[in-house]
Image: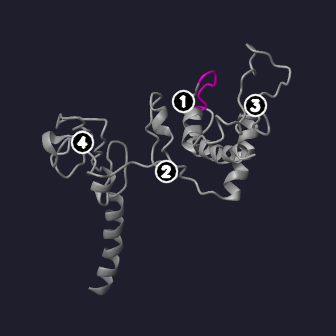
Amino acid sequence: MTNKLKAFVPLVLVVLISACTANGDNPGLEYAPQMYHSVPYEPLTQITDKESGEWLSNREDGLGEFYNSNPNNPYSQNVRVPVAGTVKRTGNGMLPYRLKKEDLLAAADVVNPLPDTPEIKTEGKRLYNLYCDHCHGTNGKGSVDPSAKVGEVFAGVPSYSSAAKKNLSQGHVFYVMTHGYGRMGSHASQLSAEKRWKIARYVRELQQQ
C-alpha cells in the first residue's frame, strides 16, 4: 500500500501542476485572482455597464472586467471630494502656487518656502547666471549694454538695488518670474517652481548690494 501511495502522489502533483498551466484560450488557474483583476476605480473614467468586458472577466463578483463604478460612493461615482482641510502638495512637499496674473499685490505676502542657506543661494546664483543676467546683468545692476538707448531691448532694465526695487519681496520676484511683468515674459516654462524660489533667494542678495 505504501509503495502504491508513493507512486500515486507524484501523479497527483503532475496533474495539479498541469491544471495551472495556461495554454491557448485556457488561462489556467490563478492564485488570488482578485489581485490580478483588481477593480480600477480611476477618477477620470466611469464605466457603468456591468457587463462591459464580461467575456474577459474573472472577477469574484461576476461583473464585467471593465466595469469600474464604485457602489460604495453616491451615484457609484469614482470621483470624490478631498477630505476637508487637505491640500495637494508638489513632489518636493511645497504647496502649489495658486496666484494668478492679476494677484500681483498678494504676491508680496508669499514667503519663500526654501531655507536661507548658502547652498540654496549658490544654486540660485548659478540659475540666475543662466536665465537672468543677460538682461539684469551679472551683478543685478540692470542693462548689460552700457550704450543702450531708450527703446532698445535692454534699455530701462532697473537695478535690483535701486530705491524702487531693493525692498521688493521674494514673493514678488517669484511672481514676476512666474507670470512675467512689463517687457519680461514668464519663465515658468523654463524654470520649475523650486528653481524660481532659489533665484529669488539670490536676487535678495543682489538687492542688498
Q: Identify which amino acid the numbered label 1 is placed on.
A: His
Q: Which residues are magenta?
A: 182-189
Image position of 128 (left or right of 42): right
Marks 3 and 2, how far apart in space?
Answer: 31 Å
Disc 2 crowd rating (10 Å Cα; few below 14, some 14-19, many 20+) is few
x, y (%) of residue 67?
A: 22, 39
In the image as oriented, which residue stretches furthest toward the top? 151
Disc 4 crowd rating (10 Å Cα; few below 14, some 14-19, many 20+) is many
Q: Tell me which label, 1 or 4, sits earlier in the chain.
A: 4
* Secondary structure beneath label 4: loop
Q: Main secondary structure of the magenta part?
A: loop
* Secondary structure beneath label 3: loop
Q: Identify which amino acid the numbered label 3 is placed on.
A: Gly
Q: Which residue is painted at 30% across and 45% down in the image?
A: 40
Marks 3 and 4, how far apart in space?
Answer: 53 Å
Residue 188 shows in this picture: no
Q: Which residue is painted at 34% across and 58% down in the image?
A: 20
**In the drawing, what numbered circle is on residue 179?**
1
Q: Tell me which label, 1 or 2, sits earlier in the chain.
A: 2
**In the drawing, what numbered circle is on residue 142?**
3
**Camera-nearest label, 1 or 2:** 1
**Camera-nearest label, 1 or 4:** 1
The correct choice, above or below, for 22 with respect to 13 in the image is above
**In the drawing, what numbered circle is on residue 94?**
2
Q: Which residue is painted at 72% across and 22% down in the image?
A: 156
Q: Which residue is painted at 30% across and 49% down in the image?
A: 37
Marks 3 and 1, how far apart in space?
Answer: 20 Å
Image position of 85 (left or right of 159): left
* Secondary structure beneath label 2: loop
Quadrant of the rendered image containing residue 76: top left
Write down the residue under mark 4: 78
Q: Tell me which label, 3 or 1, sits earlier in the chain.
A: 3
